[in-house]
Amino acid sequence: MTDQNAQVANMIGQSFSGQQQEAETQESVSQFEFDAGFQSKIAALTILDSTFNERTEGLISPEHFENKSEAVLVNLAQGYFKKYRKSPDATIFAKLLKEAIDGKRIRSDMKSEVVEKARQLLKADISDRDYVVDEVAAFAQHQAIGNAIMKSVDLLERSDFGGIESAIKEALTVGAADNSGYDFFKEIDSRTVTRQDERDGKIQPNGITTGIKMVDELLYHKGWGREELSIYMGGAKAGKTTALINSAIYAVSSGYNVLYITLEVGKMIMASRADAAISNNIFGELKVNPESVQAAVSSMGLSSNRGEFMIHEYPSGSWTPQDLRRLVQHYKAKGISFDMIVIDYLDIMAPNYRMNDEIANSKSVWVDVRAVAQEEGCAILSATQTNREGFKADVAKAEHAAEDFNKIRIADLVISINKTEEEQQKGEARLFFAASRNQAGGFTIRIKQDLARMQFCTSVLSAA
């Protein structure tokens, strides 16, 4: 959870003694030649970004950092990455710190410095990852070549020209990894450790809660999956936007950062819908008692556990996946990384490059948006319309996606919203798991709703 980072930083009350020494190597290690600000950026990426760690593995050592507190925190994050092949989220990071504190691996003289440094790094700008990777790789290769030259002096005295050639060639291979290879057999140990820790409760699922406990329990990630695209599908006025805004609110109230993109209605209308949902007021009657609405929203806003909630409005048919990337980078430069992005909705986005084939345009949008989820390690949630047959059907299934079936192939999870006229009058609906990449589909959950108050699910009635 990215913006639990500030809260987690406040939990860091101790530092670790001797952490820097654990990463000593036989080769000489020089401190980074980068300025303090750039070193802090490297440290923040090492702590927060799994892809950065994959690409720079073996190139960064705690001893490279001039700031000892950064060295301590980097060493902690690298130890976790080496074991689990991913960066810790904020909750796990806090747990690692607590365990180290409880284990008496503490240097009390560094306490305040590490606390402040952790606060800075957990809120740091971690944009421009690729550029930082290139700079780190260039530094590492320069250092490797220097070490090879020093080693070659001794080899030259022994006339070991083959050794000299081998040392120089090896130094020239130092660089950033393309992170494309995964050694299946070698990594079974790390997969087993992860599964054991998940079984024993040491690692909690990293899905983003849907806000509906039964749905969370059924999903592979116990919520919306990171690096995945999840979709609500339904006919016109089925409650898709209400489902999206509720999902955003549930995530924010659980400490996750959420970016909400509205392409169909204005951001003020969307904010008012959120006000109604949070305050449990009828949407059309918010002005009857605005003070109670304000109190409810302000109460959530003052919670120490809530995440950031940013809403952006763009015209239909003009906003592209590349625009999404730029917006995400803009916030990362301000120290905000999003756990979930909600797009209302994908069908009215524009492709990066428009073609004459509308199906090709649609596929391009969906593929490129899902790529953002993978690149940023966040969950992306959106909605899509059913076709005419799906609108008439008792249950909208995968084949009822409007216009382009590629959407079903691309999405990781599709949940259709279904209701008969009788169910609608009773304030009920059925959620059908129409398609899923990671768990069984084909089951239904009956829910109670109060759409007048923007409440997508007030209770679960049954499951089948």
Image: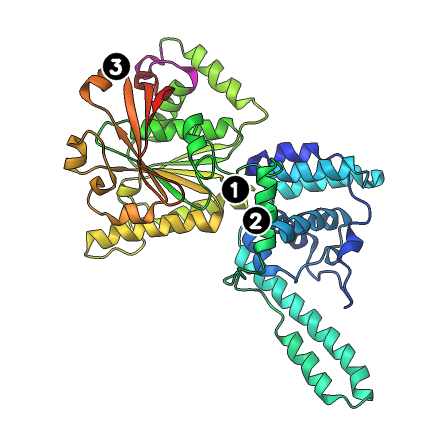
> From the image, which quarter does the C terminus lie in?
top left
Q: Position of residue 327 (x, y in %)?
A: 43, 45
Residue beneath label 3, please? 426
The answer to whether residue 87 of the structure is visible from this angle is no
Which residue is at the front of the view, 414 or 93?
Answer: 414
Residue appearing at x 34%, y 52% in the figure: 367
Find out whether residue 280 is within the magenta segment.
Answer: yes
Where residue 126 is drawn, which disc sits there? Answer: 2
> From the image, which quarter does the N terminus lie in?
top right
**As displayed, is residue 226 above or below residue 444?**
below
Disc 2 vs disc 3: Cβ atoms closer than 8 Å? no
Q: Which residues are magenta?
A: 278-287
Disc 1 vs disc 2: Cβ atoms closer than 8 Å? yes
Disc 3 vs disc 1: Cβ atoms closer than 8 Å? no
**As displayed, is residue 300 above or below residue 58?**
above
Q: Secondary structure at mark 2?
A: loop
Q: CA distance from mark 1 to mark 2?
A: 8 Å
Q: Earlier in the sequence, mark 1 or mark 2?
A: 2
Q: Secondary structure at mark 3?
A: loop
Q: Earlier in the sequence, mark 2 or mark 3?
A: 2
Find out whether residue 400 is within the magenta segment.
Answer: no
Kind of residue at disc 1: Ser
Residue beneath label 1, please? 337
Which residue sits furthest top? 288
In this rendering, would 441 be left or right of 139?
A: left
Q: CA distance from mark 2 to mark 3?
A: 49 Å
Kind of residue at disc 3: Lys
